[in-house]
Image: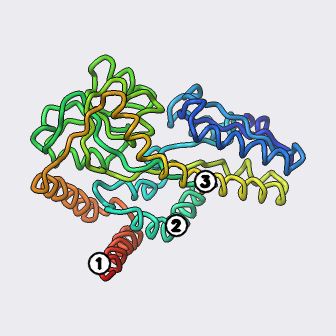
Amino acid sequence: MAGWLLAAPSHGATLKVATVLPDGSTWMREMRAAAAEVAERTEGRVKLKFYPGGVMGNAKTVLRKMRAGQLHGGAFNSGALATLYRETELYGLPLLFESYAEVDAVRERLDPEIQRGLAGKGLAALALSETGFAYLLSQRAIRSVDDLKGAKLWVLEDDPTSQIALRFADVSAVPLPLADVYTGLQTGLVDSVAAPPAAAIAFQWHTKVQYLTDVPLMYLIGVLVFEERALARLEPSDRAVLESVVSETARRLDAATRASHDEARRALESQGVETVTVSPEELERWRAIADQTIAELQDEGTYSPELLDAMLGEISATRDAQARR
């Protein structure tokens, strides 16, 4: 507690924020620009200091440092916050979305619910930003469920959703922190990852794989959270500036991420990563595994039934509306 009192900002503040995202990434460039705007609009009272590239440790370590007051915020993938509020990883259920229209409808309904859930854990989620659809990148071609057998597929630590799906597919998962994936690919500890193309490039994973399976396996988001205790000590007007600027930056990041998807795919191809297609019949097998995964999670009550039902209802309504056009 004493450590928090020493480290906590009071009115004016330098808010220390950690992320595994590398310096020079789009996220870091946009957030540094946001930090400059916040500092200007608050006349220097609120500053953001970033620690990129995982220098503050993995997600668990960053959360622990936030609780101790050594850090005030962190940018995480949604699964990393699931130990605190499980529903943060709802969007990442396998083969859930078939279009961006479905994504947009669900996020409009559920983003505020996720923010409220994290607030109940003492975390202010100022930004939920799109990471994109994750594809399977591998060192050997994977065209079928059977091809996956024997693969050493990376999954994030503490990610029960992916591990359940892989169990149905009879695939062995290799849990690793995000920062260890490149080394895992380099040493052969893992030979396959599921990631958005832009993320694979940012983390240099694309240099260790040869194939991309053309099936969007899951939709991923990142979440920028601050300790509520830190923000509560800001002047209300300064906090409003911070929240407004970060929220607007997140909207720009969403648009930029979506616009850069095809460009990232082309970049992978230019680097020699071959696109592998999946037959319609095989895709149905993959969808059956995904449906079984979601059904088991429903039966086990892994997620809030109300939020899960709301999400599935939004998807169904969006598909019905598109079918009528």
Q: Residues within 10 Å of mark 2 (few under 14, many from 20)?
A: some
Left or right of 282 in this view: 18: right
Residue drawn at 79 percent across, 48 percent down: 38
Mark 1: secondary structure = helix
Left or right of 41 in this view: 168: left
Residue type, numbered disc 2: Glu
Q: Position of residue 137 (x, y in %)?
A: 29, 36
Give yes or no for contact between labels 1 and 2 (Cβ–Cβ under 8 Å). Answer: no
Q: Quadrant of the N terminus?
A: top right
Residue type, numbered disc 1: Ala
Q: Which residue is mark 2?
A: 113
Residue type, numbered disc 3: Arg
Residue drawn at 54 percent across, 54 percent down: 254
Q: Quadrant of the C terminus?
A: bottom left
Closer to us: mark 3 or mark 2?
3
Q: Is residue 215 above or below residue 148?
A: below
Counting residues from the N terminus, which is met first, the one under dot 3 or under dot 1?
A: 3
The image quarter in which residue 98 lies: bottom left
Q: Is residue 199 above or below residue 254?
A: above
The disc at residue 252 is 3
Q: Position of residue 90 (x, y in %)?
A: 39, 58
Mark 2: secondary structure = helix
Q: Which residue is mark 1?
A: 323
Left or right of 234 in this view: 249: left
CA separation in Å, label 3 and label 2: 21 Å
